[in-house]
Amino acid sequence: MDKLLIEGGVKLKGEVLIGGAKNAALPIMTASLLSSGENIISNIPHLKDIATMGALLKQLGVDFHIENGKVSLNTEKITSIEAPYSLVKTMRASVLVLGPLVARMGTAKVSLPGGCAIGARPINLHLMGLKKMGAEVDLREGYAVVRAKKLKGASIYFDIPTVTGTENLMMAAVLADGITILENAAMEPEVVDLANALISMGANIEGAGTSVIKLKGVNSLRPVNHSIIPDRIETGTFMIAAGITGGEIKIKGCNFSHLDSIVIKLKEAGLTIDKEDDGVIVKGPERLSSVDVKTMPYPGFATDMQAQFMALMSIADGTSLITESIFENRFMHVAELKRMGADIKVQGSLATVKGVASLIGAPVMATDLRASASLVLAGLAAKGTTIVERVYHLDRGYEKIEEKLTPLGAKIKRVK
């Protein structure tokens, strides 16, 4: 099992290029199931989750190839309608085949994802929406079996905004009879990117990026040819890398308009952030200032940036309060940061972070994707050597992070 060795204390300096957004690529890959033919998706990041989704689509009969950041998916022959537990358990986004399969094939058998390391993430809202669209839902032996000869438009209200739920029902609705309205829908840029890809395939969609999305069903869709948006979480992580090391990084290929809440909080913490035509320049201060954050659905502060921001606050002057309102178990990185000398106390969904003068390198263990990133960031800032174990979590969402950090001056290497 791979691990990362980091010698901390280096001010990072240089340029880094942001890759495509994993959380936009995965639903758009599944959207290819709605068409019959050759689909091309570019700016695909080289990640474990992309390979897992490719394996699932192959199992469904899709001819899948990936090379140099471009995916080819031939969806002429769908030979299976089952997403098995063996794949869904490794990547919850596998449930995104549900909507497209029911819309095109009239049936789907998808393993229930259950919980994951950061908390329970049920798909009850996905199934509720499909029922309202006329589907029969049968739960048995850990699977959701969904059938509908032809889905029908419906008005669907989400009790809480759900990104994958919004995406699944968007993909179901584009081929349904009539009009579907999704209220309290997720507004994330990745949802908008999926909508734009579907529109390029011939779908009729209005309101993506707002809380109300209106979809008018069409008879068929053509294959997709689409380039994935930049990864805003990777961008935010490299912004924090500049801040936590007191360095200066030019981040190229990012979309500044997707980063408002992150930029506001990082500026409050003392970072200098200047937008340029081809990216953004981020400079860390001599001493960071403590800032309070609360994770919220987009456009609020992203839960996927909470762990990284906590690492930053662990060496800031003063005390910061970090509230996690999205997932119940997303403070598992706290114990590992404390091993490096961080002063953090957790009560329920609130973490109180008292900044210390510096962190000390230590062996630490990653528990999930974003926790992994927070430990790498802490290691970059710490005195001495940090060993980050279980970096397979990191490889799910960051494309060769050590290869992007090394040219910035980071002393980081991967060892078997």
Image: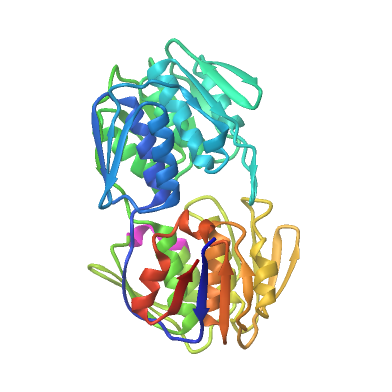
Q: Which residues are magenta?
A: 255-261
Q: Is residue 256 magenta?
A: yes
Placement of the N terminus among the 4 image quadrants = bottom right
Q: Is 181 left or right of 67, judged from the image as shown?
A: right
Q: Nearer the viewer, residue 360 or 303?
A: 360
**Residue in front for this viewpoint, 1 or 361:** 1
On the image, which quarter does residue 157 sit in?
top right
Residue 3 placement (x, y as % from top left): 53, 67
Does the magenta stretch mainly form a helix, a strand or a loop? helix
Establish if 349 lies above or below 344.
Answer: above
Please indicate whether residue 88 sits to the left or right of residue 193 in the image: right
Q: Is residue 223 magenta?
A: no
- Residue under the point 30% across and 27% down: 75
Instruction: Residue at 68%, 51% (x, y): give it.
Output: 328
Total count of labels: 0
Q: Position of residue 173 (x, y in %)?
A: 41, 24
